[in-house]
Amino acid sequence: MRILLAEDDSRLGKLIKHMLEKEKMQVDWVTEGNAALEYALYSPYDVVILDWMMPGLSGLEVCDRLRKRRYQGAILMLTARDAVDDKVLGLDTGADDYLVKPFEFSELMARIRALSRRSAVVLKEDIVQVGDLVLNRTTRVVRRGDREIQLTGREFQMLDLLVQNRGKVVPREVILDRVWGLESEVSSNNLDAYVRLLRKKIDFPGEEKLIHNIRGIGYKLGE
């Protein structure tokens, strides 16, 4: 299960991330609202956990902007506000659930499992097709036409990110962050080399080129 955690309290954020990873979950942790919005729009998550009060955009504002962009993923709001009016406001803004601090980790896990079951109903989203390219996120199998394409884990992540944002330019910094992480030593030149290898596997001679370099900005998938 993939989780986006947006929590500006470093101690609490580290603890929640550690506990979720002990439950075999993949966790991306950000500490401010603008980053949470960007992560949620560029990458698929089973559940997005938003702290109400964060630097930049608040959790409530992030939730509102995601829903206005027709974001369909599950959103769980964390907050110290326990007034009924605040809960109503959070739910009316688009949150699927609401958890008041302080809370037990077992309760957080129960809420996450319930939300993931609810959002897992749309199984068709696990398979995405762009032209004759088919990407299956469940089996991690990629096909183009009648041939199966063997990709490394990093290559699959890159392709999945481009497919999620097909037709849009994905900045180099976003690709490096999502695939390798901000603390990685992978450079922009290294990224170009990885993309060249991915292109060799995806774009055969005589086939329409799917991965395009947008000079000075990043890459996009599509015409």
Image (tube, rainbow, N blue to C red):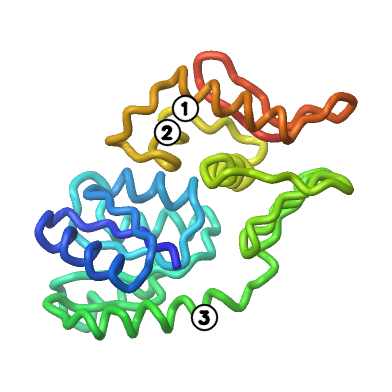
**Label 3 to label 1: alpha-carbon separation:** 33 Å
> For this rendering, which residue is in front, 145 or 73?
145
Query: What residue is pinned by disc 3?
Result: 118
**Label 3 to label 2: alpha-carbon separation:** 31 Å
Residue 84's x, y, as percent? 22, 83
Residue 149's x, y, as percent? 74, 45
Label 2 amino acid? Leu
Residue placed at 49% from the left, 50% from the top? 43
Vertical side of 118 occupied by 14: above or below? above
Residue 80's x, y, as percent? 13, 72
Are the residues flagged by discs 1 and 2 in contact, CB closer than 8 Å? yes
> For this rendering, which residue is in front, 34 or 82?
34
Label 3 amino acid? Arg
Vertical side of 180 occupied by 110: above or below? below
Query: What residue is pinned by disc 2?
Result: 176
**Label 1 to label 2: alpha-carbon separation:** 6 Å
Query: What residue is pinned by disc 1?
Result: 172
